[in-house]
Amino acid sequence: MEWTALSVSLRLAGLTCLLLLPLGLWLGRTLALSRFRGKPLCEALVALPLVMPPTVLGFYLMQAFGVESPLGGLWQSLTGGGLNFTFTGILLASLLANLPFAVQPIQRAFESIPPNLREAAWCSGLSPGRTLLRIELPLVWPGLVSALALTFAHTLGEFGVILMVGGAIDGETRTLAIAIYDRVQAFDESGAAIMSAMLLLVSFLTIGVVYGLAGRRRWRRG
């Protein structure tokens, strides 16, 4: 086990979940409750990382983070450093690559709440904010947990986007998935097998959590 690579992966996954949760909550609820002409386009943009090859997404992000681009140039003028081949760069890339994993489960959870339940809460004197805190959030918590689990597991296993944007700098951008690739390239199959088994276990437990929560919701409805 390469503990430095594991530490980078865990830090990346934890920060990605922490930063995406409020964004996913806001965007998922907005897409679930709003009706506007551009909604299909917004949903398609959110889901785009699911179908776009990771290396393609990584290539475009690498170009966008370069010092000659507006975003990369602005970042360099503010901080004095670039985004490519840095932990900040792979964190931003991870946020974009994992956006659908954070938004879609939350959106589906909010869509499952009957509209008359919100109306009844408003008629009872609850403000929209208190309705969200006291009525909606307790009902959508399985969606929140699913979003966090999927985002965390996908971030741990992300390879193409991270490699394109961050390279493989030890202690900075070299994640566990990249370490597995390096071990295979070095014909160290036993080391690659140990780390792959850990990621496989994390993926299996994540899917178990998601399907367990989905089954619990169906049982309650039945």
Image (spheres, rainbow, N blue to C red):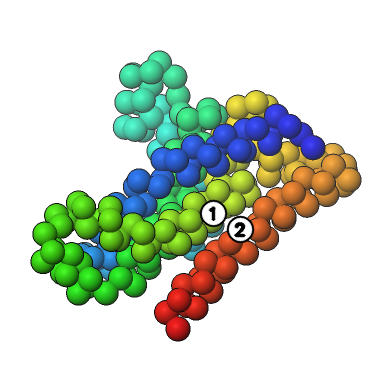
Q: Quadrant of the C terminus?
A: bottom left
Quarter of the image with the N terminus is top right
* Nearest to the observer: residue 139 or residue 99: 139
| Mark number displayed over residue 206 | 2
Location of residue 105 in the rendering, given as x and y in whole percent from the top left corner: 43, 63
Disc 1 target residue:
149
Relative to 166, is 192 above or below? below
Q: Position of residue 101 (x, y in %)?
A: 47, 57
Residue type of the residue flagged with mark 2: Thr
Q: Secondary structure at mark 2?
A: helix
Q: For this view, does 207 lie left or right of residue 75?
A: right
Left or right of 84, for residue 20: left
Amino acid type, mark 1? Ala
Task: Give SS at disc 1.
Answer: helix
Q: Are marks 2 and 1 in contact (CB under 8 Å)?
A: yes
First-in-chain label (2 vs 1): 1
- Identity of the residue furthest to the bottom in this view: 222
* Point 36% across, 25% down: residue: 75
Please tell me how crowded label 2 is: few (under 14), some (14-19), or many (20+) other residues with Cα within 10 Å: many
Total number of numbered labels? 2
Residue 145, x across and y down, in percent: 48, 56
Picture residue at 14% right of the left edge, 55% below the top: 127
Q: Is residue 53 above or below residue 176?
A: below
